[in-house]
Image (cartoon, grey):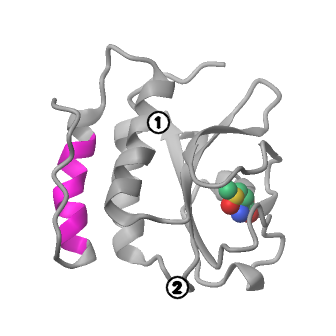
């Protein structure tokens, strides 16, 4: 597809995702490896929603989450299993929506500006291979609409083999 995203100037969050999702699916290029695809996907989400931080952590050969492609301020590079929101989403194999990160026990504050967060695991054959992590400077930025749509994004990404 063309490398230009169609971005609406108005519309509800659900309507924006409705326009974004097919474009993300079309953006995925199976002739490329995971780095190019993951990088483009977080860029596309960011072009639509302009979050504080949007990116990926992938499980490395040491069985830790390692920082992958992202957009936003510099972030911690390694997160252990069951640590932070990312490590807990991995441990639970479930999306975690955090309305207020300051009230989440064990939250890892890569940036003091972040106030809410969503972490969506990416599963291949029912096994977590990484997570999509998005931070917002607003409280309560994420809800079921984000969860449902970002879980679909994670399904698109699950088609791409990830290797270190
Ligand atoms: N807050 C995350 C750490 C990663 S940064 O938000 C980019 C966590 O608690 O796992």
The answer to whether residue 118 of the structure is visible from this angle is: yes
Magenta part mainly helix, strand or loop? helix
Residue contact between numbered discs 2 and 1, judged by CB atoms under 8 Å: no
Give the quadrant of ligand 1.
Answer: bottom right
Q: Earlier in the sequence, mark 2 or mark 1?
A: 1
Q: In the rendering, at what x and y percent does residue 86 appear?
A: 68, 56
Label 1 residue near ligand 1, CB within 8 Å: no
Q: Which numbered tag is attached to residue 39?
A: 1
- The verdict on residue 127 being magenta is no
Vertical relation: 95 (above or below) 64: below
Q: In the rendering, at what x and y percent does residue 36 appear?
A: 44, 26
Image point 48% across, 80% down: which residue? Answer: 141
Q: Which residue is mark 2?
A: 140
Span colored in magenta:
14-24
- Quarter holding the N terminus is top left
- Quarter holding the C terminus is top right
Image point 16% across, 77% down: which residue? Answer: 11
Give the left or right position of residue 25, taking residue 110 as reference.
Answer: left
- The verdict on residue 22 being magenta is yes
Write down the quadrant of residue 2 in the picture: top left
Between 126 and 30, which is closer to the camera in this rendering? 30
Q: In the rendering, at what x and y percent does residue 71 appear?
A: 54, 49
The local crowd at label 2, few if under 14, some if 14 to 19, many if 20 or more residues have their Cα within 10 Å, is: some
């Amino acid at each position: 597809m063309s490398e230009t995203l169609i971005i609406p100037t108005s519309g509800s969050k659900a309507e924006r995702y409705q326009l974004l999702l097919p474009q993300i699916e079309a953006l995925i290029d199976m002739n490329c490896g995971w780095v190019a695809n993951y990088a483009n996907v977080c860029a596309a989400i960011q072009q639509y929603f302009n979050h504080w931080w949007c990116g990926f952590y992938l499980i490395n050969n040491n069985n830790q989450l390692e920082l992958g492609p992202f957009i936003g301020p510099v972030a911690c590079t390694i997160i252990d299993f069951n640590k932070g929101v990312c490590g807990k989403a991995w441990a639970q194999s479930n999306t975690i929506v955090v309305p207020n990160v300051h009230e989440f026990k064990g939250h890892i504050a890569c940036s003091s500006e972040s106030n809410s967060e969503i972490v969506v695991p990416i599963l291949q054959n029912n096994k977590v291979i990484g997570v999509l992590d998005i931070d917002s400077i607003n409280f309560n930025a994420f809800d079921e609409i984000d969860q449902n749509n970002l879980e679909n994004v994670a399904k698109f990404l699950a088609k791409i083999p990830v290797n270190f």
